[in-house]
Image: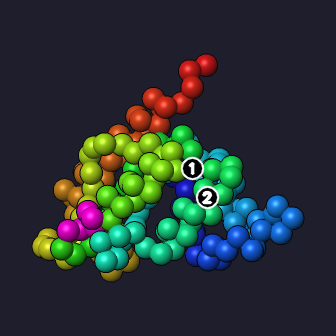
């Protein structure tokens, strides 16, 4: 698994396409997505939706040719109230339009502020029950990814 940092991406602006070329940070990002077998989205929920930087990354990836197309994907989130569950719905809608294929279950949205403590001071997941659910998501994503790959 590789963490892909989306913070270097400029805000989407098609005027940044010069002679059919994308900004260098966008090209690097798109190549990482193209080379991946599947995508694990981990994002908080902002006002019942996905974050602006994540939507921006989705938009840059969708410029033709769409680098998201036909990738297996899963979503995990942590937050208050609903643990990010409502943002899952929005991200799934956007992802379906981009031809991402999400696992159906298990779903993972963690109510981060309810006892017992879920994270240590460094942000590492420490709750054993949550770790087990996360493992189930990763195993399901792996299995779905393998199912979607062409048979040789």
For mark 1, give the secondary structure. loop
**Coloring scheme used:** rainbow
Residue ID at (30%, 72%): 48
Residue ID at (71%, 62%): 28
For mark 2, give the secondary structure. helix
Residue 36 in view in this figure: yes
The residue that mark 2 highlights is: 61
Q: Residue 127 lies in magenta, yes or no?
A: no
Q: Main secondary structure of the magenta part?
A: loop
The residue that mark 1 highlights is: 68
Give the spatial CA distance, label 1 vs label 2: 6 Å
Counting from the top left corner in percent of width and height, residue 54 is at 49, 68
Counting from the top left corner in percent of width and height, residue 146 is at 48, 32
Q: Is residue 66 above or below residue 53?
A: above
Residue ID at (44%, 57%): 94
Residue placed most toward the observer, 64 or 132? 64
Task: Give the magenta part as a residue range.
Answer: 82-86
Instruction: Tell me: 98 left or right of 135.
Output: right
Q: Residue 83 lies in magenta, yes or no?
A: yes
**Quick one: label 1, few (<14), some, or many (20+) residues within 10 Å?**
many
Q: Quadrant of residue 127?
A: bottom left
- Quarter containing the C terminus: top right
Counting from the top left corner in percent of width and height, residue 5 is at 57, 69
Residue 117 in view in this figure: no
Q: Is residue 98 above or below residue 19?
A: above
Q: Earlier in the sequence, mark 1 or mark 2?
A: 2
Counting from the top left corner in percent of width and height, residue 116 is at 14, 71
State if disc 2 and disc 1 touch (CB < 8 Å): yes
């Amino acid at each position: 698994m590789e963490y892909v940092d989306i913070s270097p991406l400029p805000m989407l602006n098609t005027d940044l396409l010069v002679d059919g070329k994308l900004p260098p940070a966008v090209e690097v990002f798109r190549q990482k997505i193209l080379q991946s077998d599947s995508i694990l989205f981990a994002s908080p929920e902002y006002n019942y939706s996905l974050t602006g930087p994540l939507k921006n990354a989705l938009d840059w990836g969708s410029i033709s040719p769409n680098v998201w197309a036909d990738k297996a994907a899963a979503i995990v989130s942590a937050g208050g109230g609903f643990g990010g569950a409502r943002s899952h719905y929005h991200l799934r809608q956007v992802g379906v339009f981009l031809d991402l294929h999400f696992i159906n279950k298990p779903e993972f949205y963690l109510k981060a502020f309810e006892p017992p403590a879920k994270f240590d001071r460094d942000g590492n997941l420490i709750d054993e029950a949550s770790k087990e659910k996360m493992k189930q998501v990763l195993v399901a994503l792996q299995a779905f990814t393998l199912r979607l790959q062409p048979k040789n």
